[in-house]
Amino acid sequence: MLFDSLLEALKKLVRVDIQDFEIFSKDLQHVQLKKNEIWEQEDKISHFMGFVKSGLLRQYSNKDGVEFTTNFFMENDFAGNYVSYETQTPSTTITAALEPSELFVIPFSVLQAYHRSIPSTKEAADLIGKTKLLQVHERNSSLLMNTPEERYYQLVKEKPALLNRVPQYLIAQYLGIRPETLSRIRKRHKN
């Protein structure tokens, strides 16, 4: 089945009725992105929740031509700027593919419409939202409280696959450090 990976990810969150999932999956769109293709644009209201089937996406902000990486989404991650949709304000971030990527997407409005007829969609959406909120809180706390080395070790622990898939200058951006600092930390880490 095309949506097996999404079904398995949802089963880890909530109890999923297969018949309900089949109804829900009719509204999913299969999106294929080329490397560097933008999925969500800055200054536009976000309308979709996505699930990364394969590939790797980067979320970033652009201020005066300088990019700031805020997140990475890889296989089995949920993506989408719910704050932009909920507040009906333009997104301050861009989400683009770092690798050729496949996503399953659904409009937030359609997802919300399912909340009455398929209660598990609301339960799953709430859990995903709480998880994303916690991730943002932890990232902000880490940027404020942890040393660059501590942030690097946290990334190694939580998302080791990123280190081999993402250019080092983007890892440094995400950690809030200069590439030279990252090189020194990695050298110490190898020793």
Image (cartoon, rainbow, N blue to C red):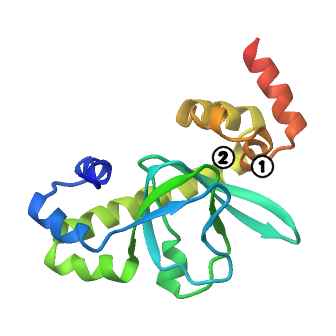
Picture coordinates of residue 73, whole percent (x, y): 54, 52
All told, the count of numbered labels is 2
Q: Residue 137: x and y, percent?
A: 56, 56
Residue picked out by circle 1: 173
Question: Which quadrant is the C terminus positioned in?
Answer: top right
Residue 144: x and y, percent?
72, 51
Q: Amino acid at mark 1?
A: Gln
Tell whether 133 sits left or right of 167: left
Q: Position of residue 6 (x, y in %)?
A: 31, 53
Marks 1 and 2 sit apart, C-alpha to C-alpha, by 14 Å
Quick one: label 1 or label 2, which is nearer the N terminus?
A: 2
Q: Which mark, by number, is residue 142?
A: 2
Q: Height in image: 41 above or below 17? A: below
Q: Is residue 29 left or right of residue 74?
A: left
| Residue depicted at x 58% and y 31% | 160
Q: Secondary structure at mark 1?
A: helix
Q: Nearer the viewer, residue 137 or 9?
A: 9
Q: Residue at x 43, y 56 (%)?
A: 131
